[in-house]
Image (spheres, helix red, strand yellow):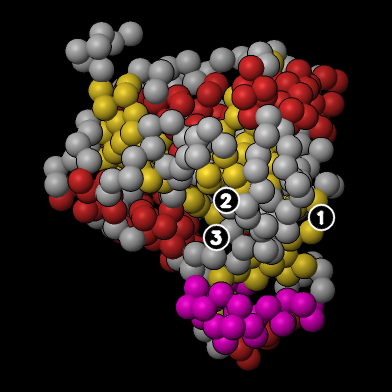
Amino acid sequence: MSSDTTRKRVCVVGSGGREHALASVLGRSADVVVSPGSPGIPGSVDTDPLEIDADLFVVGPEAPLVDGLADRLRAQEKLVFGPGADGARLEGSKAWMKEVLAKAGVPTAMHGTFTEVEPALAYLDTMPEFYVVKTDGLAAGKGVLVTHDLAEAQDAVRTYLSGEAFGEAGRTVVIEEGLTGPEISILAICDGTKAVALAPAQDFKRIGVGDVGPNTGGMGAYSPVPVATPAVVETIMTGGVQPTLDTLRGMGIDYRGVLYAGVMVTPDGPKMLEYNVRFGDPEAQVVLPRLTTDLVQLLSEAAAGNIETIPEFTTDAMVTVVCAAEGYPMSPVKGPTISGIDRANALGGVEVFCAGTGGSPEQLTVNGGRVLAVTGSGPTLAAARERAFAGVDEISWPGMQYRIDIAEAASVAAAEV
Ligand code: AMP
Ligand code: GLY
């Protein structure tokens, strides 16, 4: 434990549930400010990060990273955890990410990149099973269509490329073969040269129970993940993340931040679906609280280019359930008053992270699509799941929606081992 005189000051940039989880876990050993944060996140300040004095900056979301915030902070000689705009392009352009994967020799789905409708439609016709159409640029997690319906895929190609569906982000599309298998998220902490894996997580992308309906930013997550055995994680690190980091380095990119590997464990082995350049949301809400090593130390080392700390985790499992606004993900209804957060937090083994909250700290209101992430912990996934849902049961507002099947299958599978 550091004494008060050596206690560091950390600035977390962002305002979602991931940033609340970062602030909570960094706050175990440092004083934390969150910019801009939200009424639900303690330590929130209405000050531009470039005006803040802190020993370490942790940039949460992808948009400011792609926009070069980490570069601007580094230009002020600040210690920053988060890639510069050069590395953040991995998430900012799926077409470029695929080029990096090819250079690094990382297994991924067969794919092509297109800016014109006719060749894109011709390529769709060659896809073996089902169709995946992605916007090249950022689309808040909504720019990916996975479908068995060729007409729907063709329609997506047309509306993306015309700019109608996602503006500039869609004017280049990546078309991929559809892969099958369980998906896992490996968040790797990178110092420019070396990468260390955090505990695996799995998230739930679709809005509906049973993985139906449109994609969302993520409706829940859990960790550990029974299918993500140490051998699978090792394969992903040595065959995916490390070669990617080496390739970036060879291109002159000093990548200090999270490389979030979105992986599908296919019958032919793990394949890289995507990279994100930041912690997953809501994966952060289950992975970070499980850390038993000091996150301030780990991220400071990574930011300084020299990781020595090996991250360790409690054997306790964690499950987080996202409570979303009515109408999410299409048109979330903002404004209702939220009740029960204090009661949920007062239950043992429950922590509520605020994702899209407005109003005031005394009276929070719905102010986003994903509003809260309620994390439960326990000795097994089943126990953690029970705690998370006990927390959710305390919380309400008109139209609140959540998935009742978060971590259900994994809890059963883990119990049968
Ligand atoms: P991405 O943003 O690229 O991870 O895509 C979002 C989601 O779409 C992924 O989490 C998968 O569930 C799904 N997806 C992406 N690529 C593929 C693919 N090649 N095959 C099957 N599903 C995919
Ligand atoms: N949970 C998925 C993401 O953070 O992109």
Q: Position of residue 117 (x, y in %)?
A: 61, 88
Above or below 272: residue 96: below
Please give the residue where the numbered disc 2 appears in the rendered image. Answer: 367
Q: Position of residue 244 (x, y in %)?
A: 42, 49
Report, in whole angstroms, how far the alpha carbon at label 2 lies from the one at label 1: 25 Å
On the image, which quarter does residue 286 sit in? top right
Above or below 325: residue 80: above
Query: Which residue does the image show at 84% across and 26% down from the upper left?
Result: 412
Q: Secondary structure at mark 2?
A: loop
Count of marks placed on residues: 3
Query: In the rendered image, which quarter contains the N terminus?
Result: top left
Q: Which badge, 2 or 3, comes first in the chain's sequence?
A: 3
- Assess disc 2: are there few (<14), some (14-19) or many (≥20) residues with their C-alpha within 10 Å of its C-alpha: many
Above or below 6: residue 199: below
- Determine if the C-beta at disc 1 is less than 8 A from ligand 1: no
Q: Which badge, 3 or 1, comes first in the chain's sequence?
A: 3
Label placed on residue 212:
1
On the image, which quarter does residue 196 sit in? top left
The amino acid type found where label 1 is placed reads Val
Q: Secondary structure at mark 1?
A: strand
Q: Secondary structure at mark 3?
A: loop
The amino acid type found where label 3 is placed reads Ala
| Residue 4 appears left or right of 356 | left
The amino acid type found where label 2 is placed reads Asn
| Residue 409 appears left or right of 204 | right
Q: Position of residue 182 (x, y in %)?
A: 73, 44
Query: Which residue does the image show at 64% across and 83% down from the upper left?
Result: 159
Report, in whole angstroms, how far the alpha carbon at label 2 lies from the one at label 3: 16 Å
Q: Is residue 169 magenta?
A: yes
Q: Which residues are magenta?
A: 150-176
